[in-house]
Amino acid sequence: MSSALADVDQADAPAIRFTGVHKWYGSFHVLRNINLTVGRGERIVICGPSGSGKSTLIRCVNRLEEHQRGSIVVDGVELTDDVKRIDEVRREVGMVFQSFNLFPHLTILENCTLAPIWVRKMPRRHADELAMKLLARVRILDQAHKYPGQVSGGQQQRAAIARALCMTPKIMLFDEPTSSLDPEMVKEVLDTMTGLAQEGMTMIVVTHEMGFARQVADRVVFMDGGEIVEINAPLRFFEHPQHERTKLFLSQILHIRH
Amino acid sequence: MASLGYIREAPELEESPPALSSGALAWARANLFSSIGSTVVTIGCVALVAYLLPQVVAWATTRAIWSASNGAACRQHQDGACWAFVIAKWDYLRFGSYPIAERWRVDVVEAIGAALIIWLLWIHAPRRVLGALLFFVAYPILALILLHGSPWLGLPIVDTQLWGGIFVSLLTAVVGIVFSLPLGVLLALGRRSRLPAVRAASVVFVEFVRGVPFITILFMANNLLPLFVPETWTPDRLLRPLAGIIIFSAAYMAEEVRGGLQSLGKGQYEAAMALGLNYSRMTALVILPQALTLVIPGIVNNFIGLFMDTTLISLVGATDFLEAMNNAIKDPVWAGPTIMVTGYVFAGIFYFTFCFGMARYSAHVERILAKGRK
Amino acid sequence: MDRARANRSSWLNDQRVRGLVYQTLLLAGIAALACGAIYNAVVNMRARGIPMGFGFWNDVAGFDINLHLINYSNLSTYGRAFWVGLLNTLLIAVISIPLATLLGFVIGVARLSPNWLLSRFALVYTSIMRNTPLLLLLLFWYNAVLKSLPGPRQSISIGDVVFLNNRGLYLPMPVARDSAVWLLGAVLTAIAVAIRVCVWARRRQERTGAQTPTALVAAALLLGLPTAVTAVAGAPFAFDVARLSGFNLKGGLQIIPEMAALVFGLVTFTAAFIAEIVRAGVLAVPVGQSEAAGALGLHRGLSMRLVVIPQAMRLITPPLTSQFLNIVKNSSLAVFIGYPDLVQIFAGTVLNQTQAAVQVMAITMAVYLIISLTVALALNTFNARYALKGR
């Protein structure tokens, strides 16, 4: 246990708190003693080499993955096997996937209104208005009646963001949202996410887009081999990385030598 | 929201997972007892197995009659299988009424066929093209001569009416594949042809054969073939169902190969054309080798289906393994209530072992191919 | 000069010309084969005195059929025998297809169950059924099981209303009484009201978002209303139960062992294939779909109903239809156990008696082809309408 652990001082309860979280896939120790607190309105970017456990970490937040030891408290609710609690948490946490995962048999509008209607029990007109508003915000309102297969990758991902936002979540999780996109479409999605951050949404973003991290993140978390190696404000993280492994990773990603 | 940074000082030790979350106990919790419903189902299944399995095993082993020379012992002990019956009838079940002195010929043909098939199905075997030529061209001729006989070679003729049993089942299935695969390839290529007449002819043939029951094809071959050829050519009684099998299998083969050709993608065709290969060279050297390797699992599945369909040829007078079993069951020396069940169970085990084995092989090939394609 | 030579040689190499040549050769070859076959057929048929027209259709059949849904006796014509056989084939299809689908879906869901034992049981079932010849299964059920049942005098009876012996399965035959009309009315009303409730519930959800348990309400209606009406109006059916009379059972609804064996064999056999189709269809829906649904807060039941199953059904429908056609085609194995279907009656007995092989086979195959092509056409239309839309 590292003694230099510093906690975030919060007046109100944190959005997410990981305490001593461990996870195993079979006998493979994939998350090792994760301690992390995310404050309300805070933007965290998690980066690291592939296989470091970053995706696993954020998938634990909405219980797409289960942790075996330690505790994860999301918006005041602790994640256990209790199904009701899990559903509660999932209502307040939105997720955007690397492979979009839009529902191909529904139009984009229907993708967005599905959960509000069936989970929040919204009347259809209400749900449609909300969805249109959010689709306009991510700038694909004109594609609302198309099917996912009929629009581009960047448009699909923006639709996926709108779909998650329609549940008015308190926390948004992004799992490598731009890794499956053609380069010319990455910017439109990152712009959407930046706009979201500027409105004060609590966000955890797993990404390799360092420009986005520099611009938007409050803290950058570096993970490697299942453990958190370094956390810092973006400026200090990129200009003056402290840990050896962080320096190595940054030099590989940014082709800069430290 | 000022936050202090964090830097790791010492690495975390790797630990082993907690007892209840991995290993046998965790597996059981997740897979057998994950909910009340699941627990009930688990208990029910275990109870069912505990009740049935000992009975079945006892019927097949401890209470069964393993050796006897007639049905008396089996009639006395009706609570077990009568394997003695199967053992006694084994030669008939294998060869039908093929003359005993000539049965070595059947063995030779089967051994060579097995060797050739293994050669062809082993993906990394050397010179498979040679093997293919041998299997599709030389082997049928050799088999025909050996099995039927030829006065010039001093092999007495054995009438096809005497052929029966496992060897006939294997023969019809293998002949079916040997002839229907080239025919199926032609039909598949024809279906993708630019020439409308060729395409139409292929489509009509394939959809016609796939739209009717196999039995009607057998009937057609059995009853119509003698009418459509001159009187003097009377087709052999085994040849007619063979023709029906070839036609039937070719249509399904065509669909398999067509699937393989389609999944190849335009890129291969375009690369071959860009290199200046004409249609036949492109097809023979680039397209078919890849497509056929892709559909080996499909072809093996077709072979399994064909092997099971050979049971139908008894309708037109040929004696396959199932028909041989039916005949054996009727033997009055062995008559008894357990004989029929024993015979059918044994036939079931035989077909299951053969077909399941081939299915496993086909899945294995699919896995290897999938790896290669990634 | 040179240009003229170039033109001449290129004429033969012209793709279009070659194409025409190949096609002409092919058609000529097929025509030659056909003519040769027809010529030989005519010669052979004349020589053997085989009738060449369809006159046999109106000749007296002279044989009995032990299961006929329309009137038939051995004085009926061959034509009538054809219709009897066709109806018997359709009867098997109409009974077997729903049963096989139901059993197949149940086993398919079992294959997907997280309970390891249940999924293995289902795997054992499908493995055995898919690697055993259908004919062997039919012979087993017919010869080893049904034919070994005791005779009518020692019938196995369940509650003294259902009897099982080697002549068949005897169920009580419902005979409608006057009050049956009330029951019919009750059932129809229940269905109509249930539909109305579902429509109303959906509108209500669209307007206010509130959800109603329509499944429960519909079930209550469909079970409750007919029961209530029966209680008031009296039993709608009297049951004619089979009773021993002499050496045989008389009365009741008799299901001949041939039919029982055929239906049971077809259903159990095809269900295994349908189970695999269901399993493959559900597994083919990417896991990201159910993850996304879960991430949105949909619990497992809603996620299945709204996201996974609609996509799985699109993948399941084409191979499922193919299995339905297989049931129709496989019912022709009836000829091995003596069930009087189209092939057994027409391509079997009628062909043997009239020797009009060409005509009989042509008609028989035409019937199956019409069924196959109709179903294929319907499937294509369905696919075109419901396919997932892409660019």
Image (spheres, rainbow, N blue to C red):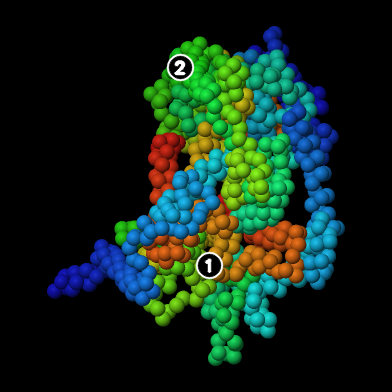
User: What residue is pinned by disc 2?
Assistant: A128
Q: Secondary structure at mark 2?
A: helix
Q: On the image, which quarter does residue B157 sit in?
A: bottom right
Label 1: how many residues lie within 10 Å, few (<14), some (14-19) or many (20+)?
A: some
Looking at the rendered structure, the kind of residue marked 2 is Asp
Residue at the extreme front: C246
Tell me where residue B227 sits by quadrant: bottom left
Does residue B298 appear in the picture of this structure? no
Q: Is residue C73 toward the left or the right of residue C40 in the image?
A: right
Q: Position of residue C28 (x, y in %)?
A: 29, 69
- In this rendering, position of residue C262 left or right of residue B279: right
**Residue, far top:** A11
Write down the chain letter for disc 2.
A
| Residue in view at x 50 percent, y 24 percent | C181
Image spot of residue C365 (x, y percent): 42, 57
Location of the C terminus of chain A (image quadrant) = top right
Tell me the amino acid under the disc marked 1: Val
Answer left or right for B95 relative to B151: right
Q: Are marks 1 and 2 in contact (CB under 8 Å)?
A: no
Residue A223 placement (x, y as % from top left)? 68, 32
Figure quadrant of residue B345: bottom right
How many discs mark residues in the rendered view?
2
Residue at the disc numbered 1: B316
Question: Within 10 Å of the Cα at label 2, are there few (<14), some (14-19), or many (20+) other Cα atoms?
Answer: many
Residue sitting at x 47%, y 55%: C74
Disc 1 versus disc 2: distance between alpha carbons? 67 Å
Would you say C169 lies left or right of A140 here?
Answer: right
Residue drawn at (62%, 54%), measured in percent from left and top? C138
Kindly tell me whether residue B198 is visible in this rendering: yes
Protein chain holding label 1: B
In the foreground, B183 or C391:
B183
Q: Are marks 1 and 2 on the same chain?
A: no
